[in-house]
Image: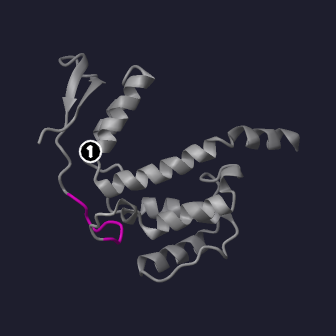
Amino acid sequence: VRGPRLLVKNNDKKGGVGQMLKFSQYSKGLKNLFGISKINRPSEHIPPLVTKSLNQLIKLKGHEREGIFRIPGDLKKAKSIKEKFDNKKKVDLRPIKNPHTIASLLKMWLRDLPEPLLTFELYETFIQIADVPTVTLKIVCLKEVVMVLPKANAEILKEIMYYLNFVTWFYEVKIFIFLWY
């Protein structure tokens, strides 16, 4: 199976701008990286920690908080909760009222993955896309590379990106509140 081809700017003098970059189809399959086994239903590729964290962030209106992923929450509490998820214990995030703690939990989980969500194999490809000359072409390239990610990685990335997009809707609200006080 041939992998996708991306039109990228190549800094190598021999290749020149517009050289086609080909990378192999990611074929390692689903690893048990996320505490789940391979399941055919897509929603079950997303670990409970991610789903519960994003849902709780929405309930706590974390999207309206300044620096939701920049300002740390209670790291000791986040670590304790992460350990419960890791040990497959039942976890209820409803008692946590600080959305920064939930965001810290999600960031901690992403940092602790054995392999990054965007994978080591595709790292250079993602970096090269930064040099693509137009936004439209960058989007096309990103879509193609995301299609090569393992299914679980792509679905988790999609859920996180949906939430991050949702956070951006409230950017002006946060600026207005900041200027008001």
Q: Is residue 5 left or right of residue 147?
A: left
Q: In which quarter of the image is residue 97?
A: bottom right
Residue at 35% across, 60% down? 42
Residue at 44% across, 59% down? 110
Q: Which of 42 and 55 is in front in this view?
A: 42
Residue 179 sits above or below residue 92 on the image: above
Residue 70 sits above or below residue 51 on the image: above
Q: In which quarter of the image is residue 156?
A: bottom left
Residue for badge 1: 148
Residue 81 sits above or below residue 31 on the image: below
Instruction: State which region is magenta.
Output: 29-36
**Numbered disc 1: secondary structure:** helix
Neighbour class for label 1 at 10 Å: few (<14), some, many (≥20)?
Answer: some
Q: Is residue 85 left or right of residue 68?
A: left
Residue 167 image point, x, y percent? 62, 47
Q: Residue furthest left?
A: 1
Question: Can see residue 136?
Answer: yes
Magenta segment main secondary structure: loop
**Count of marks, rendered view:** 1
Q: Quadrant of the C terminus?
A: top right
Q: Which amino acid does label 1 sit on?
A: Val
Question: Can see residue 130?
Answer: no
Q: In which quarter of the image is the N terminus?
A: top left
